[in-house]
Image: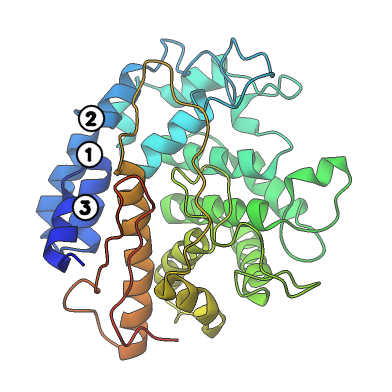
Amino acid sequence: MESDAAVLAWLHDSDPPLRWKVERDLLDAPTAQWEETRARVAREGFGAQLLARQDPDGQWAGGAHFPADFRGDEPQPWTATSWSLMSLREWGVDATALRPDTAGLLERNARWEYEDLPFWDGEVDACINAFTLANGAWLGAEVAGIRDWFVTHRLPDGGWNCEWVEGSTRSSFHSTLNSVIGILDDERRTGGTPALRDARRGAEEYLLERRLLYRLSTGEKHRWADHLGYPFRHRYSALRALDHFRAAAQHDGTAPDPRLADANRAGARDPRPRRHVAPGVPAGGPRVVPGRRARRRAVALADVLRAARAAVVGRGVRRPPGLVRRAPAHAAILLRVARGTPA
């Protein structure tokens, strides 16, 4: 077993999009330090490479959700505009680092593959609309129509399902989590709307009723609950859900809901979760070298467990939680809080 210091050094020895989060969330670095590191995302590493691939018309790969040359008989390559914006936003890139007036360029030039709809109007897919809502809030685009769409398209059980257009009347773990994450991002940047805030909280209740892990109808564990692949893209995982609820509690000024306990315990126990590596790598673009996905999963889990422990003891954790690195290098790495992780 490696020491905490060794694992933290391994996490910190990474590209700026992850390094600044390690400094802020695990090392308690001064604000000026992690902000300086975050500013480097646009100038070096993955962030700089992805920014360099933005087309003159504001898009990436010539398409909204799929590249212009996508034929549909191969895996999603994750290189088009919506995915590229999502990555840059999540990495902490300032909107001013993109081409001038990217929001306006996309309004004029980008159309969804579904029925050729205007980019900032969204489309019929809840996950795509969630990404677009957050991206629009980040870039200063007009996304009022998407805010209204989420309010009017909630399903009777509280959440959303991207398959509603095919007749589904039950919410989806995947769609609901993506939706509340996008809505919260919009709230934090713009203030959102009261109706949309109520919709978010109602949809969060859908996940909390299921304790982030279980199907309400059968009680069985959701097949994606233990997913720890990175990038998360559109996929559900209890880890990603816990990270959302941590951020939502901070934003709302509320205490963590006790129904998060099962998912927190599952993360702390190191249940050897299902590991999924997303297909599709940007042709000639940034590649994730062994260990990079593992670092990102590790930091996300550390953030969640640290917040849970701090909530129980009623104060911040003075040092990062106990960390355990599991070899080999290409395997998933998990972090655990040392003894005393709260239930």
Q: Say whether marks 1 and 2 touch (CB < 8 Å).
A: yes
Say left or right for 218 vs 87. Answer: right
From the viewer's side, name the closer residue of 216 and 52.
216
Q: Which amino acid type is shown beneath numbered disc 1?
A: Asp
Left or right of 143? Residue 186 is left
Residue occupying image coordinates x 68% and y 21%: 113
Report the quarter where the N terminus lies: bottom left
- Work out whether residue 343 can be spotted: yes
Residue under pointer 2:
45
Q: Name the foreground residue: 246 vs 235.
A: 235
Residue 305 in the image: above or below residue 278: below
Q: Earlier in the sequence, mark 1 or mark 2?
A: 1
Q: Which mark is on residue 212? A: none
Residue at screen point 49% across, 15% down: 61
Residue lying at 34% horizontally and 56% vertically, measured from the top left: 333
| Mark 1 to mark 3 CA distance (whole Å) | 10 Å
Circle 1 SS class: loop
Q: Is residue 140 visible?
A: no
Residue visible at 67% across and 73% down in the picture: 210
Instruction: For label 1, count other residues whose C-alpha is less than 10 Å away and answer few (under 14), some (14-19) or many (20+).
Output: some
Please identify the quarter of the rendering in which residue 253 is found.
bottom left
Mark 2 or 3: in front is: 3
Residue 20 left/right relative to 151: left
Instruction: Please indicate whether residue 86 sits to the left or right of residue 197 in the image.
Output: left
Judged from this view, the residue extending furthest toward the front is 328
User: How far separated are the C-alphas under marks 2 and 3?
Assistant: 16 Å
Residue 216 against residue 165 in the figure, above or below = below
User: Which residue, given by chain and number where applicable, does mark 1 sit on?
Assistant: 15
Which mark's residue is nearer the viewer, 1 or 3?
A: 3
* Residue under numbered circle 3: 11
Kind of element beneath mark 2:
helix
